[in-house]
Amino acid sequence: MSNTNVNPLEPKKSTGSFFQDNQKSIAFIVGGIIVLILLYMGYQKLYLAPRAEKAANQIYKAEEYAMIDSLQAKAINGDGSFLGFKEIADEYSNTKSANIANAYLGGLYLRQGNFQDAIKYLQKYSDTGSEVLDPLVTGLIGDAYSESKDYKSAADYYKKAADKASNTYTTPLFLKKLGLVYEALEDFKNAEKAYQSIKSDYPESPEANMIDGPLARVQAKQ
């Protein structure tokens, strides 16, 4: 019988390292990653950048039309010379202009009472990091659901809008709307929380100046 001792903590000797044994596979994988990176860089430079410039050059006219009630159809569909928000959003996706076009489209469709299309385009908007625009777009989705009498969905989006950024402009605005849809749902306890948050956290806001009435109303119904 052999007296050779084996240390169980000593690693076994290998006939070759992982990199030696898998050199061809690793080279293939690394090469594939490099190709993907180059393709992505080319996509950004040769495809997205020119598209972004074209979209930016088109959107300003639609923005002008959007400010005039009688020309809002041209803002959506274009005027024959300049594209409207709809074509910019659909044809120039993955650009900042298309993202803003989605927000404009949603707002315009909401004003027209076309709530389903409003929701469709507003939900395509991607947050930009703006403490005002991002919650406003989310809150507009709440408005579209509220106008459609879908108060539960409206409450979800108003809460998201209120939570998205803390400022005296958008936050108390959507807390007030949140309280109103909670009232429509006869959820007076949560309505009180929303109104009380305006009173306590945003006392300098316009909404706080008129919140005592709604607050007393929901308290009386509990």
Image (cartoon, rainbow, N blue to C red):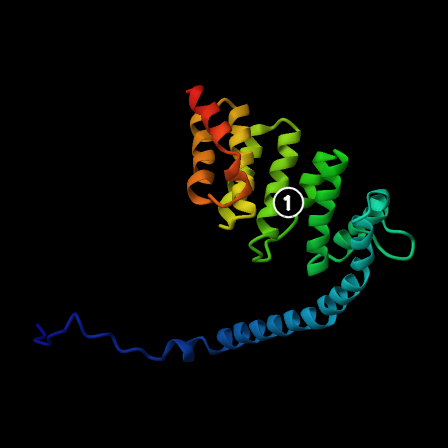
Q: Residues within 10 Å of mark 1 (few under 14, many from 20)?
A: some
Q: Label 1 sits on what residue type? A: Gln
Residue 98 coordinates in the image, percent (x, y): 72, 56
Is residue 212 shown left or right of residue 46?
left
- Label 1, secondary structure: give it: loop
Residue 56 coordinates in the image, percent (x, y): 76, 63
Taking the spot 58% from the left edge, 52% from the top edge, the residue there is 132
Is residue 44 shown left or right of residue 189?
right
Report the front residue among 11 and 59. 59
Taking the spot 70% from the left edge, 34% from the top edge, the residue there is 115
Could you tell me if residue 200 is visible in this image? yes
Is residue 42 shown left or right of residue 211?
right
Q: Residue 2 lies in what quarter of the image?
A: bottom left
Residue 217 coordinates in the image, percent (x, y): 48, 23
**Vertical relation: 102 (above or below) 120:** below
**Vertical relation: 35 (above or below) 177:** below
Q: Residue 130 lies in what quarter of the image?
A: bottom right
Residue 102 coordinates in the image, percent (x, y): 71, 49
Residue receiving disc 1? 123
Taking the spot 59% from the left edge, 51% from the top edge, the residue there is 134
**Vertical relation: 91 (above or below) 146:** below
